[in-house]
Every structure is written in C-alpha cells, then in structure tokens.
Amino acid sequence: MTLRPTLALGALALGALALAIPLTAQDPAKPSRPKLPWEQGKVQIHNLDRSGQIDRSAAIADVDLPPNYRFLRGKPAQKLVQSWGNPPDPTILGVIVTQDDDKDRGFAVIVTYDEEGHVKDDDANKIDFSELLDTMKKDAAAANPQRIKRGYASMTLIGWAEAPHYDRATKKLYWAKRLKFGDEKEETLNYNVRILGRRGVLVYNAVAGVPQLTEVAAGCKELLAKTEFTAGNRYSDFNPSMDKVAAYGIGGLIAGKLLLKGGLLKGLAWLIKPALIGLAVVGGALLKLFGVRRKPQPEAVPVAED
C-alpha cells in the first residue's frame, strides 16, 4: 500500500505504527543506549526525501505534511530506524521527522499500516478507561518475568499521560501512556494515534520523554488532522459482503491486542513488544520499548505478509 503525497512535502507510509523520538545525543554515562549524536541525526534529516510514494500497490491515504516535516519512505526508512539501534522491521513503511534545529524539540514518527480488518467502534462509548488501564498494567507486569529471562528490561505501565480520546465522526483515536523500564528513574512517554479505515488502521506511535509531552502531542495531532484515507478506502466505504471485520474494537486497539496477530514474530511478539503493537522505538533510552537487549540480539523473525 502506498501513501500519496498531496503537497510538495509529502507522502507518508501506512502501517501498524508510528513513533516519535527525540534525536538527541546519547548519554555517555549509560552505555546500554546507542549513540546517535544530534549532529548525525541532523544530517540524516536534511537528507530525507520531501515527497514520494511508498512502494505498494495503491495509494490509500493522503497526508499533507507541514513545511517543517520531512519524509523517508520504504527500505531507506527501515534502515534508518535500524541504524538507531532497533532490530530489523520490514513492517515500517516510512519515517516522518521534524526539521527542527532544537534537539529538545525534534522527533521522528514511524508509520505502518495494519490491514487486520474493519474495526467496529460500537464499544467506544462503553469503555471504562480506568478499568482498561488496570488490565493493561496487569498484562505488562505478567510479561516481565519472561522479558527479564530473555535479557530485556522489565516494563511498568505507570498510567495515562493523556486519556484515550475517540472522535466517532472522523474515526480517529489517540492516547498516551507513561512507562518505566527497569531501574530507569525517568519515565517514557508513548503517544499513540490510530486512524480507522475501510480494511485496516493507520498507526502513528510517538515515543519520547514525558517532559516532551506538549511538543509530541501537538505534532501528532497536527499529523492526525492532516491525514485522510482516499476515496474507496475510507471507513464509510466498508462493504460487509466483501471486507473482513477485525476481531477487536476500540478497546482492543488501545490495549494492544493486535500484538497477538498471526505471523507477527510468532510466539516472541508478546515478549518483544508487549501490549505495544507496532512500536518501533528509536533513539536513546526509548529503545527499551522495543525490547532492545544490552547484549547482541538474534536476528528478527520476518513478519509474514497476509
């Protein structure tokens, strides 16, 4: 699937997730974090494409990127994310970065598209977010023994950084979580955006430090407002006689039940990306979200195409 640029600045990829990470220098006091100096990140940003198409069969969404964003598509985007210390991830369709000289404001967004089916939103007004959060906390805690056994840092879901919000009219959803990994004193911000379409969900995931919430939230909401599915791929274009219905609703999207889908790293999925479907964490301490080991990692299992 491809994303079609609507301005000179931009095509964006569709995929199971998008992430935001500050492109800041590595703290030399913490050797477990890969070194990505801001100067290196800045060069990468200025080398990014400003427009183009993802190498897929058809454009299913339009994204109008603001002037301060750049876009990198396809395999180069996957290599860029891998160069930041992440395992190979063939599901990444593109990377959007802010072109900002302020290292404390710049971030990247990884975009994928999950064609798991048409997500019904009948449960949207029935979800008890406090109860859902409690369940998610328990799920994260339950996965920790296996995470630790396999060499990954434990993960604690602290709470909402921004409570879930679903706009039934536009079929757009966003929320943010506060997470803590291992013995780290600082918390990590995970900002999530989902846009529901005819056959699947466009996902943007932003990961940064909690103090960056204001900038990341503003950036993600700006992208959210400028992203729309094309005619024939919109939520309203759903055809029950032809299109598959997803096995989850809005609550499942928030809880991350997509992680259990067939072919996604098979049995290791819940260990590597527990309850954080599509999270490709990049940069600094944020790598722990993706389960990056402190020792050399095994090769990632390719994601099976549906």
Image: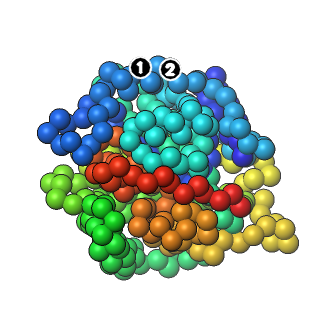
Indicate whether 229 appears above or below 97.
Answer: below
Q: Is disc 2 surrounded by few (<14), some (14 to 19) or many (20+) residues within 10 Å?
A: few
Q: Residue furthest right?
A: 241
The residue identified by callout 2 is 47
The residue identified by callout 1 is 43
Residue 273 appears in the picture as rendered: yes
Residue 256 appears in the picture as rendered: no
Label placed on residue 280: none
Labelled pair 1, 2 in contact (Cβ < 8 Å): yes
214 sits to left or right of 48: left
Estimate the x, y position of residue 204 in percent, counting from the top left: 51, 49
Estimate the x, y position of residue 52 in percent, counting from the top left: 67, 28
- Give the quadrant of residue 2: top right
Q: Residue at x 53, y 24 (%)?
A: 48
218 sits to left or right of 168: left
For the residue pair 79 and 130, the one nearer the viewer reads as 79
Q: Is disc 1 surrounded by few (<14), some (14 to 19) or many (20+) residues within 10 Å?
A: few
- For marks 1 and 2, give the CA distance: 6 Å
266 sits to left or right of 271: right
145 sits to left or right of 124: left
Residue kind at label 2, given as amino acid type = Asn
Q: Secondary structure at mark 2?
A: loop
Q: Secondary structure at mark 1?
A: helix
Q: Residue at x 41, y 20 (%)?
A: 43
